[in-house]
Image (cartoon, grey):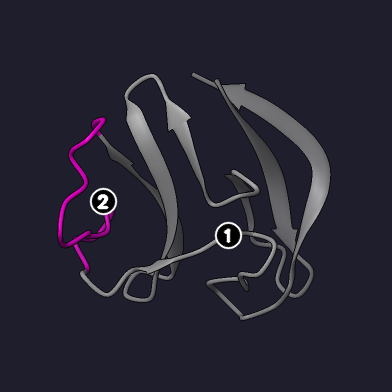
Amino acid sequence: MAIYKEYKCEGCGYTLAANPKGKDMVMMGETETFLCPDCKEIVDVVYPYGEKPEKVVCPDCGGDQIQKWNPIKGKCPKCGGNMKATGVQMCLD
């Protein structure tokens, strides 16, 4: 079970749920969080156990320039502002 926290941009109000570490293990496999500069979204990519691809693409737009991201060091994909935990927490399988 993965624990995700809600984060909100202090600049523009963009919100998302993300794992504080930027990666986790779920029932389907390993999940990692990425920033897609093409669609300006934070996305999770899930890999089946032991099948990490050489090239990772955005699941939303297919862009291949995605970069690993975590909410502690990462900036807002929309405006570049700081992301802050809102205190809302959720559990995912």
Q: What amino acid is labelled 1 in the image?
A: Asn
From this view, report whether residue 18 is shown above or below residue 88. Answer: below
Instruction: Give the crowd class for mark 1: few <14, some 14-19, many >=20 residues within 10 Å.
Output: some
Judging from the image, what secondary structure is the residue with disc 1 in? loop
Residues marked 2 and 1 touching at CB (< 8 Å): no
Q: At 61% from the left edge and 70% from the top edge, which residue is drawn?
A: 74
Q: How many numbered marks appear?
A: 2
Dominant SS in magenta:
loop
Q: At 78% from the left edge and 36% from the top edge, which residue is drawn?
A: 88
From this view, report whether residue 80 is shown above or below residue 10. Answer: below
Q: At 44% from the left edge and 63% from the top edge, which residue is drawn?
A: 41
Judging from the image, what secondary structure is the residue with disc 2 in? loop
Residue 92 at what x, y percent from top left? Answer: 54, 23
Q: Circle 2 is placed at which residue position?
A: 59
Q: Circle 1 is placed at which residue position?
A: 70
Q: Nearer the viewer, residue 17 or 28?
A: 28
Q: Name the quadrant containing residue 91.
A: top right
Residue 38 at what x, y percent from top left? Answer: 31, 75
Which of the image's four quarters has the N terminus?
top right
The mark found on residue 2 in the picture is: none
Which stretch appears magenta? 48-63
Q: What amino acid is labelled 2 in the image?
A: Pro
Residue 58 at what x, y percent from top left? Answer: 27, 58
User: Is residue 57 in the magenta section?
Assistant: yes
